[in-house]
């Protein structure tokens, strides 16, 4: 079952598709949402709850785990699967994004990236080959290539250099990956920002090297949505149809639908879990800020239409009380709800593609019940 | 089923007994441990997990809930049962202990207690009658009488005054309680510290008024253990055998066994849940501080002998990692374990009394595997 990707249905009106992604730890039905477990734990949830919610795959962060407890420590405990006791598929991000966003004193040279640990300032030099070695020790099912991108907006010249360097790193990393037998998959990350020629060049470079899957990197960092969607359309036309496509780090429901329509299969984002901890909750009628005093005596569930444990059992008044008191159960119950909301939308997306109703679902979710807006009352 | 208490077995060698306590929301098998849900949530757990762990009854705090969201707000949402969506038995502490331990500027007069809210300094005057009215609104199955005690050590004179005032308050409160029809139970709290005459007087006073259950208050605040046990022996001889007895706020396993042997039926304590959040975990081989670096690469479960979700699934290395990273799952998994440990000991206590092996169990738990000590390695 390792390294398979079988398209099972296509939307006639868009590039949306369902597929089954095979990994060494089981299959993932796509389009799929990966809850983020940077440190090996989806914040607020036990694995048991996560499985009940229907999470098929979670994302861990190679940067965080390689700093603490360290890749060798994780390897000695049976890789991430053994260490965190999660026997379903795992994807590890390479850490590039965290290095550029969290580390002081980052310096990128051709050989790799020199940075200081955000924890104690320890100087670290990381090459694309190192990122492969670390993730091989972590033993995740899907490893990501180390990429590099400048902040938005970047000039075409700066972006071209970043895209080309990311391409050269990808070639070196793939060579390192190919040097050992592995049940792991290795996915490339294209750069090029929203410059069509550069993104096309980035994608072509990766395809020439050949990866098990292809990610869009360096997006969702400030560029206009229209440019983002153009990039995805361009990628849809260029990328092989028989490999999974992954839009990294983007999680607005609206963007997810637009990306699925443009052939994207995989997503990850901290949005549902981080919002949950901040008391910002998704409902079928819009977003709710549970700390609002108007919910203090509200005996209704968060969302009448929701079947999650939180909505089946608890009132808005109780959820507000837990949030205001800083109770741990607030983070837990809110995260259950928001993640159920996301995973349920992905179930509905897959079902709609298989029953030729994707565009109807997209329209209904994004129009009168706009989930990005504040709840209408 | 309201207000019944049926002794089902007696230990021939001590005053230990099992019983079934009937309440308006179901029965509690005693000896029973009540997890503490001061604000209506056992910190770190959802009710679903709590029920899986076998909690039969939880304790909420009238002081906290009457300040926020307020007794009327709770009443409007269906009482505490409706507000927090917990349909099993609930006991509410009257708030006396919190007033004396958390509030600045407490002044006790014959009429009641004047204090400032620990939240915003609001001046509050609370009478024993008010404490009844508040708990009537909260609708808990077992209400506690408002009591008063000085800090340890107190002179005999001071203690006598406190005990006598507590007795007069109990009479007033019972009169208020009796003035309305109720499915709730009302339990008295004896004072008197460790002065035998005073404790005897306190108990006699309560028995003369007549309560559905009898609690020992003002203990576990610094007095020698031997004096505490003498009080319980004294109470065992004085209290009616057909009413439940509750030792408030004490939770060391050793003390629990000694108290059960002296006829105590009910216990509550924050120890297992608070310790869990601090990384202090009970095991059959002693206590473990999970933050210790020696567990960083330890692939073993917390306790080989434990069948809880945490021990069935996770290594000490992962639990240490979660604790060090401040992950919410650390509090959740640790609390599951510690509370399972407590509730399991209570199941074993009940079983041992019913099978004439209580003293054997007591000896085995408290001797070679002393749970209060650091783990032997």
Image (cartoon, coloured by chain):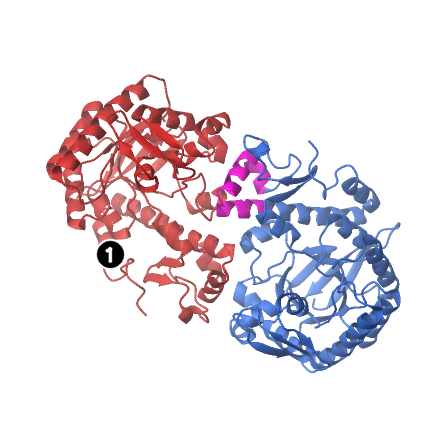
Chain colours: A blue, B red
Q: Image quadrant of residue A19?
A: bottom right
Q: Is residue A94 visible?
A: no
Q: How many marks?
A: 1
Q: Which residue is mark 1?
A: B366
From this view, report whether residue A147 is shown above or below residue A285.
below
From this view, report whether residue B216 is shown above or below residue A188.
above
Residue A373 lies in magenta, yes or no?
A: no
In the image shown, does B239 or B270 lie closer to the viewer? B270
- Residue at 18% x, 50% y is B225
Q: Image quadrant of residue A200?
A: bottom right
From this view, report whether residue A337 is shown above or below residue B371.
above
Q: Position of residue A89 (x, y in %)?
A: 64, 62
Which span of residues is magenta-colored? Answer: A309-335
Q: Position of residue A91 (x, y in %)?
A: 66, 65
Residue under mark 1: which chain is it in? B
In the image shown, does B215 or A54 lie closer to the viewer? B215
In the image, taking residue B133 as reference, residue B73 lies left or right, namely: right
Classify the position of the N terminus of chain B by image quarter.
top left
Q: Position of residue B97 (x, y in %)?
A: 30, 38
């Amino acid at each position: 079952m390792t390294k398979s990707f079988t398209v099972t249905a296509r939307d006639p009106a868009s590039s949306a598709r369902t597929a089954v992604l095979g990994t060494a730890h089981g299959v993932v039905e796509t389009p799929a949402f990966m809850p983020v477990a940077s440190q090996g734990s989806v914040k607020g949830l036990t694995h048991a709850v996560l499985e009940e919610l229907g999470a098929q795959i979670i994302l861990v962060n190679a940067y965080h785990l390689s700093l603490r407890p360290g890749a060798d420590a994780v390897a000695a405990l049976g890789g991430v699967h053994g260490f965190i006791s999660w026997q379903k598929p795992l994807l590890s991000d390479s850490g590039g994004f965290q290095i550029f966003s969290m580390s002081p004193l980052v310096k990128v040279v051709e050989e790799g990236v020199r940075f200081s640990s955000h924890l104690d300032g320890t100087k670290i030099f990381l090459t694309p080959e190192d990122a492969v070695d670390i993730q091989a020790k972590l033993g995740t099912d899907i490893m990501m290539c180390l990429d590099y991108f400048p902040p938005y907006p970047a000039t075409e010249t700066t972006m071209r250099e970043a895209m080309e360097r990311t391409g050269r790193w990808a070639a070196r990393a793939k060579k390192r990956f190919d040097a050992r037998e592995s049940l792991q998959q290795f996915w490339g990350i294209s750069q090029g920002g929203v410059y069509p020629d550069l993104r096309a060049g980035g994608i072509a470079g990766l395809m020439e090297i050949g990866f098990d899957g292809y990610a869009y990197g360096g997006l969702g960092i400030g560029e206009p949505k229209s440019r983002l969607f153009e990039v995805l359309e361009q990628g849809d036309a260029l990328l092989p149809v028989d490999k999974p496509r992954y839009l990294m780090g983007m999680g607005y429901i609206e963007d997810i639908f637009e990306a699925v329509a443009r052939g994207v299969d995989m997503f990850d984002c901290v949005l549902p879990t981080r919002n949950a901890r901040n008391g910002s909750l998704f409902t079928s009628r819009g977003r709710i800020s549970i700390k609002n005093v108007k919910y203090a005596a509200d005996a209704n569930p968060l969302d009448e239409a929701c079947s999650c444990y939180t909505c089946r059992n608890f009132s808005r008044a109780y959820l507000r009380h837990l949030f205001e008191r800083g109770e741990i159960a607030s983070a837990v119950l809110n995260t259950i709800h928001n993640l159920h909301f996301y995973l349920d939308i992905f179930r509905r997306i897959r079902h709609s593609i298989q029953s030729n109703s994707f565009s109807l679902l997209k329209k209904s979710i994004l129009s009168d019940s706009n989930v990005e807006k504040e709840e209408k009352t």
